[in-house]
Structure formats: C-alpha cells, structure tokens
Image (cartoon, rainbow, N blue to C red):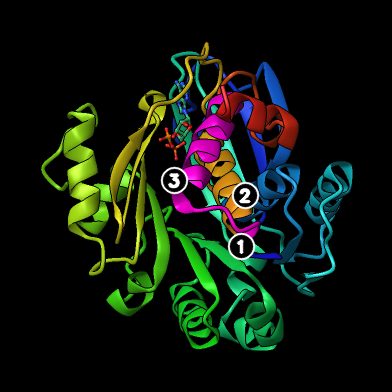
Amino acid sequence: RLVVLGSVNVDATSYVDAFPEPGETIHSHDYRMSLGGKGANQAIAAHLCGADVAFVARLGDDAAAEVARAAFARFGLPAEGVATVPGSPTGVAQITVAATGENTIVVTAGANAAVGPDVVAAEAERIAAADVVLTQGELPVATIEALARACDDAATRFVLNLAPPVGVTADATSVADPLVVNVHEARAVGIGRTLADDADVDAWRDAAASVVGDLARSVVVTLGARGAVAADADGAWAVAAPEVDAVDTTGAGDAATGALAAMLAEGRALPDAVRVAVAAGAIAVGSRGTVDSYAGRADVLALADR
Ligand code: ADP
C-alpha cells in the first residue's frame, strides 16, 4: 500500500497574447480549469501504475473542490483520506500563459495549509501499515518533518520529492529513500551545486552518489529528456529516457515520481523502479495536459521494458 500525503490545486489557466500591465484589463483567447497540485498528480500517476493508493489531502468548501473531486472520480482515485476544510478555499494556481510561452503563476495554498503535523498524527496507523509513504515540498515544512519522523519511527519507506525545494531539516531529508529532485531542486539542496543543467550525466550521477548516506538514504535526480540518475548504498547509475516528441512537459516529474513510488510499494528494487519512472515521465511529455497525459500501467511497463 502507498500513502500519498500531498497538495491539491485547481489550475486556472488563461492564454493571452501578452501579460496585462498593473491596472490593465485584457481578454484571454482560451481558458481551462484542470486538476493540479503535486500531491494529486503523483497520487493519480501511482494509481494509474496499479498502486493501492491512500491519498491524504484537504480541499476547501468551494466550487474548485468539486472540480478536484470530479477529477479523482474520473481516474478512480480513492478519496476517503480527502477531507473538507470549512471556510477555506481549495488550493488554486492562477496561471497566465503568454504567446511567447512564458507564464506567470500565483498559487494560493488554501486548504493545503491545513495539512499540518496534526494530520500526520491522525494518520499514524495508515503510515505505519504502508509499504511506502510519499510527499512533496508543497505541504507545510513542519508537516514534511513530522511525516519523515513518523515514517522513520514506523520503519516505513519514505519517498520525498522536494519540489519546490523548501528548507526542511537535515533530519527530514536524511531518512528519504529516495529523495527525488530535478536539476534545479538538486542544486538548491546541495546536489551538484556547480553543475549546469546539461552537465555530463556521469557528473550528475557522481553528484547524486556523493550525498548518499548523508543528505538522504538514496537519491534520484531527473534530467528531463536525458532520463535520470540515481544512487543508493549499493551504487550509482544512469537511466536514459526513451526518445519521444515532447509536446508538453508539464507534470512529467510528477508522473515519474508517482510511478517510482508505486513500483517501490509493490516491492521492486530502486533500479527497476527508476526505469519505470523514467518511462512514465517520457509518456507524460508526449501529449498536452498534466494528469490527462499520464498512461496506465500496461503502457508504462511496456515502454520501460523495451
Ligand atoms: P520536472 O518535470 O520535475 O522538471 P524533468 O524535466 O527532469 O522533471 O522530467 C522528469 C522525467 O520526465 C524525466 O526523468 C524523463 O523521464 C521525463 N522527461 C522529461 N522531459 C522529457 C523529454 N523531452 N523526453 C523524454 N522524457 C522526458
């Protein structure tokens, strides 16, 4: 069983020719409202990969909550761990995309801010009974730290996707197995601080290896189109991504992380899980959207086994 404790946002995206100036009102030429939040994305990715997922999250009591619940139902994601926070808005990301492809994003945490350490305490039994617990950097820092401690106490495997790379204590990252980051997040947490995005894969692999047993129990650094590198106490290695026509990379990291946690929860070793994660990420860049671009277990495993 996989417990995902994480954020839910509704992404409200307006497509404009150019960003408005302060005080200016402009018209968009397209708009969409869709499910987002790294917690929700990763829970759905793991569920699609066949994991038995318990998703623990908080929604507001507004219309956006209905959008989120409808998306969970559409994917068949069980939502018994998802509760409503009276008087709070649901987490929302107000996104503007200009014709240049640049974006501006305003995130309101809303009900996600109510996922405090008390929620970790209330979920102690589920955490102790789980094979793997997964969270991300979008929850309050105190919650991530409490969850790391709870997992360590219960000897439950803790997978930490530190995105965004918020400043949690070394105690929290040190029990992560693995800590999952992209290159930007990697540098922020001290992995490959001097490396460019396109530095040699071997250099990224060595950087990941150099922090094992110290920063985290194991590490996965995703490298976009180049796949990922990973390191644990047994060694360090690289996994190339399958070649795909990149259409929309939004949510690729979440697809990979969700798949990774799903594979670890079913008892696969880290090298095997990273291989599947890289395939899941590659499929997610092949079509538009976030969770709408995620594939099911059969397709992900078929690509991973190629
Ligand atoms: P994030 O989305 O968090 O920035 P990455 O860009 O590193 O993370 O992408 C996560 C994963 O998605 C990669 O490890 C890879 O498997 C896959 N991926 C991303 N971009 C591409 C691409 N252009 N071609 C193939 N796979 C990709």
Q: Are marks 1 and 3 in contact (CB under 8 Å)?
A: no
**Residue that carries the numbered disc 3 in the rendered image:** 271
Residue 65's x, y, as percent? 80, 56
Along the viewing direction, whichever of 260 and 255 lies nearer the viewer: 260
Please, is residue 199 above or below residue 183 in the view? above
Please indicate whether residue 299 sits to the left or right of residue 101 in the image. Answer: right
Mark number, residue 6: 1
Along the viewing direction, whichever of 207 and 86 lies nearer the viewer: 207
Residue 217 drawn in magenta: no
The CB of the residue at mark 2 lies under 8 Å from ligand 1: no
Q: Earlier in the sequence, mark 3 or mark 2?
A: 2
The local secondary structure at tag 1 comes to loop
For the residue marked with disc 2, what is the amino acid? Gln
**Residue that carries the numbered disc 2 in the rendered image:** 42
For the residue marked with disc 3, what is the amino acid? Pro
Please indicate whether residue 202 sits to the left or right of residue 284 in the image. Answer: left
Q: Are marks 3 and 2 in contact (CB under 8 Å)?
A: no
